[in-house]
Amino acid sequence: MPSANVLVDVDDTLSGTQRLFLAHANRDNPGRFRYQDFTSFDRETPGEWDGIVQGLLARPEVIVRTKPFAGALDGLRRLHEAGFKIHIASSRKENLHRTTKDWLEKYGLARYVEEVHGRPSSMSGDEFKLAVANQIDAAAAFDDTKAVAESLARNKVHVYLVRRPWNRDLPQGPWIKPCRSFQRGVIAFLGSSDTEQCKMQDASALREPSARTS
């Protein structure tokens, strides 16, 4: 039977994490960093911004204050009701695994999640997500990170890339499809020929929302 598993990122796919970081970074120097100026180099290369981000990532009490994007819950619900099993795979490291699960529960997202996969510190974000995608035989992935999208696409996983300033230079291709938001990406996926190839065939396989996140 074709795979009914999908991979979903958290930061800047389901939640506005980068804007939260910017608010903290610009607190003492407004305008120091601008959201629209961020590139993949800024986010993925050690430097001043990376140092700020790593400091904030060491503080679960800050990360838990991120809010889901409008449409995040609806997107997960649509996937679930279409018969897909949702696997959360975030690049967050061990100290935030519990925080991530608590956040999903807090905002009612966990009810639609099949499993939350925790990234080990020994793996990079793109290595980790590719490993999870291979493990679950992902039908599609929803993410915002350029390196992740490129890695998954090279391995023939359909990626719905949530458009952000740091991935604007990544062109659309047969395996990478840009979308304005996670919710819009889900709608596009469910209406695509890819979905018809990957949907579960037996409607009885639809289950009640599960809160299992481990």
Image (cartoon, grey):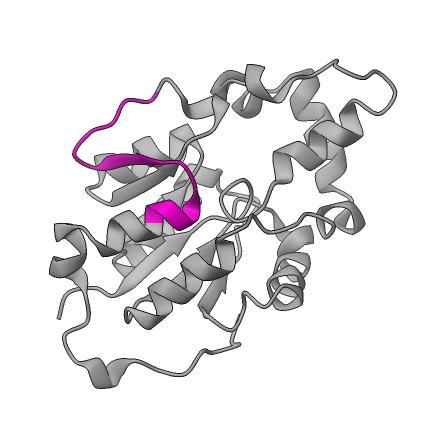
Residue at image position (70%, 40%) is 57
Find residue 75 and report its image quarter: bottom left
Q: Residue at x 53, y 76 (%)?
A: 211
Q: Position of residue 139 (x, y in %)?
A: 24, 55
- Which of the pair 188/64 is nearer the observer? 188
43 or 131: nearer the viewer:
43
Q: Which of the 4 image quadrants contains residue 36?
A: top right
Spot the residue most to the bottom.
204
Q: Position of residue 126 (x, y in %)?
A: 41, 38
Q: Is residue 12 above or below residue 31?
A: below
Q: Where, by quadrant of the figure, is residue 159 drawn? A: top left
**Is residue 175 found inside the magenta-colored segment of the image?**
yes
Q: Identify the residue at image location x=56%, y=24%.
A: 43
Which quadrant is the N terminus positioned in? bottom left
Residue 33, above or below 139: above
Give the left or right position of residue 99, taking residue 44 as reference.
Answer: right
Q: Is residue 121 left or right of residue 25?
A: left
Residue 186 place in picture, x, y as percent: 34, 52
Q: Nearer the viewer, residue 50 or 189?
A: 189
Q: Does the magenta portion include 115? A: no
**Residue 71 falls left or right of residue 151:** right
Query: Residue at the location (30% across, 63% down)?
Result: 5
Q: Is residue 214 visible?
A: no
Question: Would residue 107 be visible to someone looking at this image?
Answer: yes
**Residue 212, position as x, y percentages in the image:** 51, 76
Residue segment shown in magenta? 170-185
Q: Is residue 117 above or below residue 82?
A: above
Decide: is 130 above or below 1: above
